[in-house]
Amino acid sequence: MVPVIALVGRPNVGKSTLFNRLTRSRDALVADFPGLTRDRHYGDGRIGDKPYLVIDTGGFEPIRTEGIVKAMTGQAQLAITEADAVLFLVDGRTGLTPQDSRIAQSLRESGKTVYLVVNKAEGLSESMKAEFYELALGEPYPISAAHGEGVRPLMNLVLEPF
Ligand code: GDP
Ligand code: MG
């Protein structure tokens, strides 16, 4: 079975940029994967001999409902349910935000395998990772979705079990 990888994070962290880098066909072959919901943004890709599906949870990001700030929309939560692994993106330039912390809490509760990805890391010192350990999601992986730095090693790690 092809692993399904969900890209999760607050708006503007670079989910769609990473999605585009990880996928060749923007509107994937969802019809070939009958178990998956159709109204999300899927793409497919391959590294070496390992194919994967990616879900971009962007475009589903109105976060405020009835005055309550929710960690994530239902769409993002459904994507996580479908996923074999979650890439949780944060922004290495903005730094940690309260919304990141709320999403991290939901992800810890989901029981899924989560990779903490610090995007926009091009040109930043390794020390900017430090504050993200507070999210209690393990080692932060710095990448640049825009420039590609760190993406291949990250994906090798993510795909290793499959
Ligand atoms: P999304 O809302 O999480 O899908 O984020 P987008 O992919 O739309 O990106 C939001 C903004 O961040 C855009 O202006 C991107 O060009 C920018 N961005 C994305 N990845 C990077 C990166 O690796 N480095 C930098 N400096 N900017 C990035
Ligand atoms: Mg987006």
Image: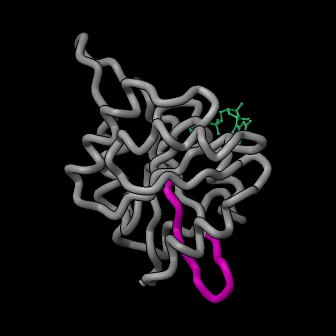
Q: Quadrant of the N terminus?
A: bottom left
Q: Residue at x 49, y 76 (%)?
A: 32
Q: Main secondary structure of the magenta part?
A: strand
Tell me where the magenta segment starts and ends, as one range: 45-55
Q: Residue at x 51, y 45 (%)?
A: 89
In the rendered image, is residue 23 in sight?
yes
Q: Residue at x 28, y 58 (%)?
A: 81
Give how far across and how far down residue 49 sits, in percent.
Answer: 63, 89
Q: Quadrant of residue 33?
A: bottom left
In the rendered image, is residue 75 in sight?
no
Give how far across and how far down residue 131 sits, in percent.
Answer: 46, 36
Give how far across and how far down residue 4 sits, in percent.
Answer: 44, 68
Q: Is residue 70 left or right of residue 126?
A: left
Q: Quadrant of the C terminus?
A: bottom left
Ligand 1 occupies quarter? top right
In this view, 6 is above or below 47: above
95 or 59: nearer the viewer: 95
